[in-house]
Image: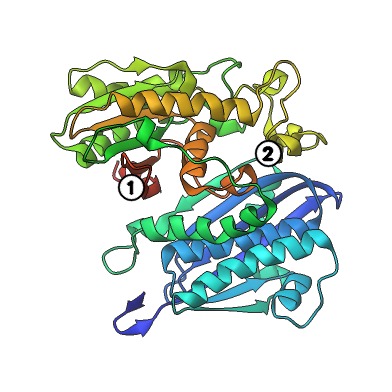
Amino acid sequence: MSRAGRQRTLIVEADGGSRGNPGVAGYGALVRDPDSGRILARRAEPLGVASNNVAEYSGLIAGLTAAYAIDPGARVEVRMDSKLVVEQMSGRWKIKHEDMKRLALKAREVAQAIAAAGGSVSYSWIPREKNKDADALSNDGMDGRSISEDLWETAGSGDAVDVEEPEVSAADVVADADAEAGAAAEPVQAQRMSAGRERPVRLLLVRHAVTDFTVTGRLDGRGGPNPDLNDEGLAQARAVAAGIDAKVGSLPVRFIASDLSRAQDTIRPAARARGLEVEVDPDWDEQNFGEWDGELLRDLVQQKDFRRLRDDEAYAAPGGGETHRELVERVRGALARALASAPDGGVVVVSSHRKPIMVVLADLLGIDLTHAWMLSIGPASFTGLELWSDGHGTISFVNDTNHLRAR
């Protein structure tokens, strides 16, 4: 998008690291406004055991995807302290390693989407001391913390672009690679869920607010300790109620939550304000992580098999864990029930967890588990969908946290 008749410029700063190379890895990325120096988006994510170069490329992909969400047609300037990534992405050095080829292809696909929207992407090397913000985020990732902040949404009129088109289109860009590998997920068939409806069903997915486990970076599935919201989480729940009221208005609403207390307590204030009860459907629960439930992510990422939990749909964590495929099956059933009983002309609000929300989005977009992790779904965030009876759907927004900043 242009501002005041000129093309917008965005700065992407990205980094990645590995403690051991290969070892415990993570990436960090941010998008900055060059005029004000304001950070518009921040990303960090653990990668399990991986090499330093894999982590750096992962940071680049996250940064480009965030820039695309802010303004698809921007002139994007990528700045990294990795000479290897900069030279390879600039086309001056050959890429020999297969992992690097795969990741470079993903980065180029996002860059091509930016170019198709009228933008451009350039790469430049910077000294490590000038990349401190991205380096700090990559250390957050290596410590097991996931960070996804879209600060640009509060930049004011004219500064922000509606997230609907970038979120869908960016996923479509990487979904092409999935199709070649035969890995696309079976899409949700909305006609089985809302047969006979002439209007779309509006679905508002809410990720639960924070607990002490969220803050300290502990894995928390359906078979774990089931912690309650902490004080910050309770404040977020009140903000969620105000946000739901602003989005839904006087429309009829049905409130559904998983069987876990943190999900129910996140939307209970909103339900009570309307004189309604929260209905419980255990199939919206988080994935069961077996004996890993309650463990610190920074400890788990050092285990060789932990990466399989992120990438292998048939893998179950030891001690009775649940596979991703099993999770998908029950979430599809929960979604079908929620949509089939939606109030006519109203909204279904579902309070759930990161992976179940990922499942719904991945099904609609037709992307696999590996690419689904690129979808940002922060605590107490909103994701809005409209699903039609013919199976088509619209993703209106993802990871909306404006209601939290209004507190």
- Coloration of the structure image: rainbow
- The answer to which of 348 and 382 lies nearer the viewer is 348
Q: Amino acid at mark 1?
A: Asn
* Secondary structure of residue under mark 1: helix
- Image coordinates for residue 204, horizontal then vertical, percent: 33, 36
Q: Is residue 8 left or right of residue 52?
A: left
According to the picture, the residue beneath numbered tag 1 turns out to be 402
Specify the farthest residue to the left: 250
Q: Earlier in the sequence, mark 1 or mark 2?
A: 2
Q: Is residue 153 left or right of residue 312?
A: left
Q: Residues within 10 Å of mark 1 (few under 14, many from 20)?
A: some
Q: In this picture, is 126 found above or below 368?
A: below
* Secondary structure of residue under mark 2: helix
According to the picture, the residue beneath numbered tag 2 turns out to be 310
Could you say which quadrant of the image residue 241 lies in?
A: top left
Residue drawn at x 30%, y 35% is 239
Residue drawn at x 70%, y 23% is 292
Q: Is residue 202 left or right of residue 383?
A: left
